[in-house]
Image (cartoon, rainbow, N blue to C red):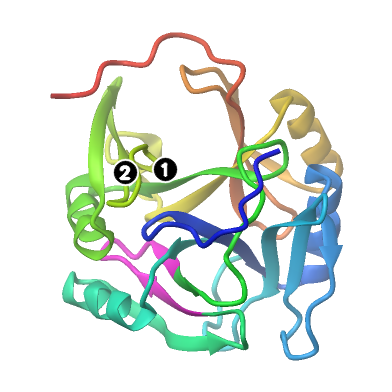
Amino acid sequence: MPIRNEVWQPGTPAWIDCQVDDPVKAGEFYAQLFGWEIQGSDPGGGGYLMAAKSGAAAAGIGPKPDSMPGMPAVWTTYFAVEDAEAAAAKVTAAGGRLLMPTFDVMEFGRMFVAADPGDAVFAVWEAKAHNGAAVYNEHGAYCWNELRTRDLAAAKSFYADVFGFGYTDFKFGPAEYSIFTPPARTEGVGGLSDDSATAAATMPDYWLVWFQYDDVDAGIDTARELGGTVLQPAVDSPVGRSALIAGPQGEPFGIIDPNKRVGEMPAPIS
């Protein structure tokens, strides 16, 4: 089981949490789906719950912020940074906007919430007492973070300006897919998916969190039994068998078994 006890490198997806109307009920759903242990929040945490696997931090579950009325239930990707204030300045300079300006989360860290030029929402985390996720890339833990966008070129430019991402581009049928690598890493840690030529082109841009799941078909059945909805049935691909699901409160996420791969990865676009 991969366990990380260090601060994540800048630009790496370092934490995930969901914002829902009822965090307690969401915790019950994910505890049964992913085997999480749901821990109550600090008295000053405003109802925020922590999810763990074998005692290691996996994700957060919190209430929707009062400052954003009408927002849907969502999963949010947090990117590690060394200086949240400097990152916020880069976001606005690159054409994004701050939805929640930089603030301290008690002694745990400093963060902000922003939207990119395509209105996809993400967050930034400057670690202090809380490094971010300690468990990842295993059953029931996050393993990939992916922007679904209708303007891939604009998105690539924005995230390169803000986080210094480099890209490796692939072509899957009519759609292009870009794997991003932060400056301090040597391997890709997430992706940007071109949805402009697919049925998803009518949807707003958004960041999708993927969780590793050892049996995707069993995961679909379990999610349905627990009140979830299947948004995309299980499909096979060169990166694994996967499906898209919405939790009972509507938040979308993906599950993928990277050990069940079908076909060969296309060569990178030169």
In the figure, is residue 246 to the left or right of 165? right
Residue at the disc numbered 1 = 189
Does 206 appear above or below 82? Answer: above
Q: What residue span does the magenta drawing correspond to?
A: 110-123
Q: Choose between 46 and 124: the one closer to the eye.
A: 124
Q: Choose between 207 and 36: the one closer to the eye.
A: 36
In the figure, is residue 200 to the left or right of 74? left
From the top left corner, tell me how far across and down residue 9 is, in percent: 42, 57
* Residue 105 sits in quarter: bottom right
Name which of mark 2 and mark 1 comes first in the sequence. Answer: 2
- The reply to whether the magenta stretch includes residue 127 is no
Mark linked to residue 112: none
Residue at the disc numbered 2 = 180
Quadrant the N terminus occupies: top right
* Residue 233 sits in quarter: top right
Q: Of the residues shown, which amino acid type is indicated by label 2?
A: Phe
Residue in the image at 62% along x and 57% along y: 5
Tell me the element at label 2. Answer: strand
Does 227 appear above or below 197? Answer: below
Give the crowd class for mark 1: few <14, some 14-19, many >=20 residues within 10 Å: some
In the figure, is residue 89 to the left or right of 214? left
Residue in the image at 82% along x and 49% along y: 54
Q: Choose between 49 and 83: the one closer to the eye.
A: 83
Residue in the image at 54% along x and 15% along y: 261
Quadrant the C terminus occupies: top left
Residue in the image at 42% along x and 86% along y: 102
Give the crowd class for mark 2: few <14, some 14-19, many >=20 residues within 10 Å: many
In the displayed orientation, state which residue is furthest to the top.
263
Q: Of the residues shown, which amino acid type is indicated by label 1?
A: Val
Tell me the element at label 1. Answer: loop
